[in-house]
């Protein structure tokens, strides 16, 4: 899977805090984490995905993930939100 799904998503969360909230609320359908994100930044998010059975995809870099989200800076994580 690639970040193309994220680009086309109607609703998404960007950033680790917002993505973690979406996971905990049961809204996140697919979570993206940048391979170069610092471990301490995404550790709670990774644990939440594992505990709740949310599919996890690794993006090549924070810059690529940010670009897929339509922002000018890198993003450690993002998610596709579903209803």
Image: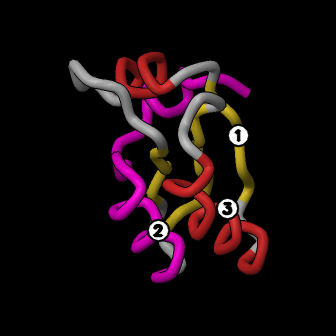
* Mark 3 secondary-structure assignment: helix
Above or below, 48 against 68 in this view is: below
- Dot 1 falls on a residue whose secondary structure is strand
Q: Quadrant of the N terminus?
A: top right
Nearest to viewer (mark 1 / mark 3): 3
Question: In this figure, which residue is indicated by the disc labeled 3?
Answer: 46
Residue that numbered label 2 is attached to: 20
The answer for how far apart the CA atoms under marks 3 and 2 are is 9 Å
Instruction: Give yes or no for contact between labels 3 and 2 (Cβ–Cβ under 8 Å).
Output: no
Which mark sits nearer the N-terminus, 1 or 3? 3
**Rendered residue at 46%/40% (across/down):** 76
Relative to the observer, which residue lies in front, 69 or 64? 64
Look at the numbered discs 1 and 3 and tell me whether their residues touch, using CB distance below 8 Å: no
Q: Which residues are magenta?
A: 1-25
Tell me the quadrant of the picture where the C terminus can be found: bottom left
- Above or below: residue 19 compared with residue 61: below
The residue located at (58%, 70%) in the rendering is: 44
Q: Is residue 6 magenta?
A: yes
Q: Which residue is mark 1?
A: 57
């Amino acid at each position: 899977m690639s970040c193309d799904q994220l680009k086309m998503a109607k609703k998404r969360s960007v950033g680790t805090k917002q993505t973690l909230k979406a996971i905990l609320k049961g809204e996140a359908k697919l979570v993206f984490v940048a391979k170069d994100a610092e471990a301490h930044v995404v550790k709670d998010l990774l644990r939440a995905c594992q505990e709740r059975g949310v599919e996890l995809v690794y993006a090549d870099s924070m810059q690529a993930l940010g670009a897929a989200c339509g922002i000018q800076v890198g993003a450690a994580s993002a998610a596709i939100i579903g209803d």
